[in-house]
Amino acid sequence: MRSDIKLVKSLLIVNMRGMVSTSTQVKDTLKSLNLEKKFRATIVPETSSYKGMLQKAKDQVSWCVATTPIIKKLLEKRGRKDGWKPLQQEDLSKLGYENLDNLVKDISQSKVILQKLKGVKPSFALSPPRGGFKRSIRRNYNQGGILGANPDLPKIVERML
């Protein structure tokens, strides 16, 4: 591995609200993030362009740093290939990975971008959380809600799987 390459963390982003009465700019941002429906999740690298997109859509989405365990759970339970069929070992070998752990490691370190993987859906369809939301879905995290940068998001996503 080259020493001049800076490893970037990955972000887990979940669209928590519907698209009704959403501005066109925010809709375009969510479309480019592949989060066009409520309760869709994706994983992107933590770069300045993605951070700007998150600030644009902060009243629609929640995000946090994507840890390896949550990425693995998402890929195992909700990872889909084209045609909405579950990811299989054969699909991983076509991508050049011998097992799921290697793919998870590369995604968490942003060596591989989920949107660029050929034949793999760039987003995960989640269910509403079991037990409901414990905080408001209309407010930002620092105001007592779940939107914006949310350190509790992995717990919520585990209940959505």
Image (spheres, rainbow, N blue to C red):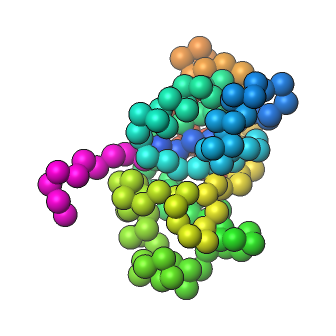
- x 17%, y 59%: residue: 2
Q: Position of residue 122 (x, y in %)?
A: 61, 57
Q: Is residue 144 magenta?
A: no
Using the image, determine if residue 65 lies above or below residue 122. Answer: above
Q: Is residue 63 visible?
A: yes
Quadrant in the picture for residue 74: bottom right
Q: Is residue 3 magenta?
A: yes
Using the image, determine if residue 50 lies above or below residue 1. Answer: above
Quadrant in the picture for residue 105: bottom left
Using the image, determine if residue 69 lies above or below residue 44. Answer: below
Q: Which residues are magenta?
A: 1-10
- x 69%, y 71%: residue: 82
Quadrant in the picture for residue 26: top right
Q: Is residue 7 left or right of residue 48?
A: left
Q: Position of residue 99 (x, y in %)?
A: 44, 78
Q: Is residue 50 left or right of residue 134?
A: left
Q: Is residue 145 visible?
A: no
Name, please, the residue furthest toward the top: 143
- x 48%, y 77%: residue: 95
Q: Position of residue 70 (x, y in %)?
A: 50, 53
User: On the rendered image, what quadrant is the N terminus found in?
Assistant: bottom left
